[in-house]
């Protein structure tokens, strides 16, 4: 099936969360979120689009671009919201590596005020289901900084396999060196976990 013909839900839910693609009009709250999380994201997400937002107009342009990328199937950004309060708690990213296999990568960050509550693990588990069932993936990969213990634990709690470790392969904004851990999950592994 051609990727543009995939019938994808614009939102889906887990036990506590609603995950949805961004849309026009999300700019004002996205701006507030970006400013609140700027320092929080500096170490591990310094290249995230959130880091360049300086105004509500910038934020609106970013969310409209993310919405357009979703429609074009270039990449998939999901805002993660607490179903009870409708508060933003995290963001999840899905990036196509190759549509031929198909293989995707997943990334995420927790809102600074919602860390340590299991939201990201729950969101990534729901996202893995979306990737394998709706995007028909064969393989999903995830990479994270080897000093980001919380991110490593998310991958492991979701049942992903650690495949490799590139040691001291990047210089951080504060001048320190760190490495990258690589995780993956195959379709058969996902199916075995979800029988």
Image (cartoon, rainbow, N blue to C red):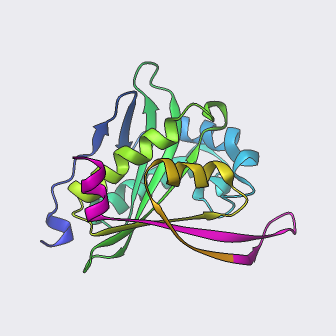
User: Total of numbered circles in the picture?
Assistant: 0
98 left or right of 191?
Answer: right
Residue furthest to the right in view is: 175
Residue 134 in view: no
Q: Which residues are magenta?
A: 167-195
**Does residue 180 belong to the magenta stretch?**
yes
Depth order, front residue of 75/160:
160
41 left or right of 119?
Answer: right
> Residue 50 location in percent, x, y?
61, 52
| Up/down of 54 relative to 144, above or below | above
> Residue 120 location in percent, x, y?
51, 42
109 left or right of 172?
Answer: left
| Up/down of 139 relative to 31, above or below | below
Residue at image point 16% right, 61% down: 6
> Residue 103 location in percent, x, y?
33, 72
Residue at image point 79% right, 67% down: 172
Depth order, front residue of 3/68:
3
Residue 25 in view: yes
Which quadrant of the structure image shows residue 100? bottom left
| Up/down of 138 relative to 190, above or below | below
The N terminus is located in which quarter? bottom left
Residue at image point 58% right, 58% down: 49
Residue at image point 29% right, 66% down: 72
> Residue 24 location in percent, x, y?
39, 44
Depth order, front residue of 36/183:
183
**Does residue 192 belong to the magenta stretch?**
yes
Depth order, front residue of 85/117:
117
């Amino acid at each position: 099936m051609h990727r543009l013909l995939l019938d994808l839900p614009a939102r889906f839910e887990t036990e506590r969360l609603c995950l949805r693609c961004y849309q026009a009009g999300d700019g004002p709250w996205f701006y507030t979120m970006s400013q609140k999380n700027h320092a929080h994201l500096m170490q591990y997400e310094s290249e995230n689009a959130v880091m360049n937002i300086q105004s509500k107009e910038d934020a609106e342009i970013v969310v409209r671009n993310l919405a357009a990328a979703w429609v074009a199937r270039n990449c998939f950004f999901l805002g993660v919201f607490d179903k009870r309060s409708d508060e933003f708690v995290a963001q999840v990213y899905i990036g196509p590596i190759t549509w031929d296999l198909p293989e995707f990568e997943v990334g995420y960050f927790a809102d600074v005020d919602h860390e340590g509550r299991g939201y990201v693990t729950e969101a990534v588990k729901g996202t893995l289901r979306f990737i394998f069932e709706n995007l028909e993936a064969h393989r999903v990969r995830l990479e994270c900084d080897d000093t980001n213990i919380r991110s490593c634990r998310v991958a492991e709690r979701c049942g992903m396999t650690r495949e490799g470790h590139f040691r001291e392969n990047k210089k951080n904004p504060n001048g320190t060196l760190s490495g990258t851990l690589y995780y993956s999950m195959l379709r058969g592994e996902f199916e075995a976990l979800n029988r």
